[in-house]
Image: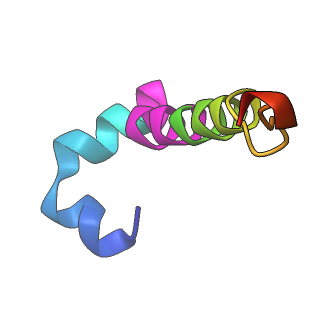
């Protein structure tokens, strides 16, 4: 959060100071989960047997 943001939203700045930047943490965890899901659901290496085609 920039200093301009904290002067425009002092209540939010105070909450971030007390509780941490929850939206940033949620964003970080969501991106991590998306990466893990992408790896878990990577079907690129899976091919149908030649007889089934």
Magenta stretch: dominant secondary structure: helix
Could you say where residue 22 lies in the image, as x and y percent from the top left? 43, 32
Quadrant of the rendering where the N terminus is positioned: bottom left
Report which quarter residue 6 is drawn in: bottom left
Tell me which segment is drawn in magenta: 18-29
Q: Nearer the viewer, residue 4 or 28?
A: 28
Q: Is residue 2 above or below residue 22?
A: below
Could you say where residue 8 lies in the image, as x and y percent from the top left? 14, 63
Report which quarter residue 3 is drawn in: bottom left
Report which quarter residue 34 is drawn in: top right
Model colouring: rainbow
Could you say where residue 21 lies in the image, as x and y percent from the top left? 45, 39
Could you say where residue 45 lies in the image, as x and y percent from the top left? 85, 42
Residue found 67% across the figure and 41% down from its top: 35
Residue found 26% across the figure and 66% down from its top: 5
Identify the residue at the far front of this view: 51
Would residue 38 be visible to someone looking at this image? yes
Residue found 67% across the figure and 30% down from its top: 41
Quadrant of the rendering where the C terminus is positioned: top right
Queried whether the magenta region covers residue 27, the answer comes back as: yes
Residue found 47% across the figure and 32% down from its top: 26
């Amino acid at each position: 959060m920039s200093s301009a943001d904290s002067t425009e939203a002092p209540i939010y700045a105070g909450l971030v100071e007390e509780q941490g930047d929850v939206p940033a943490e949620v964003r970080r965890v969501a991106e991590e989960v998306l990466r893990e899901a992408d790896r878990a659901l990577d079907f690129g290496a899976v091919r149908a047997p030649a007889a089934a085609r």
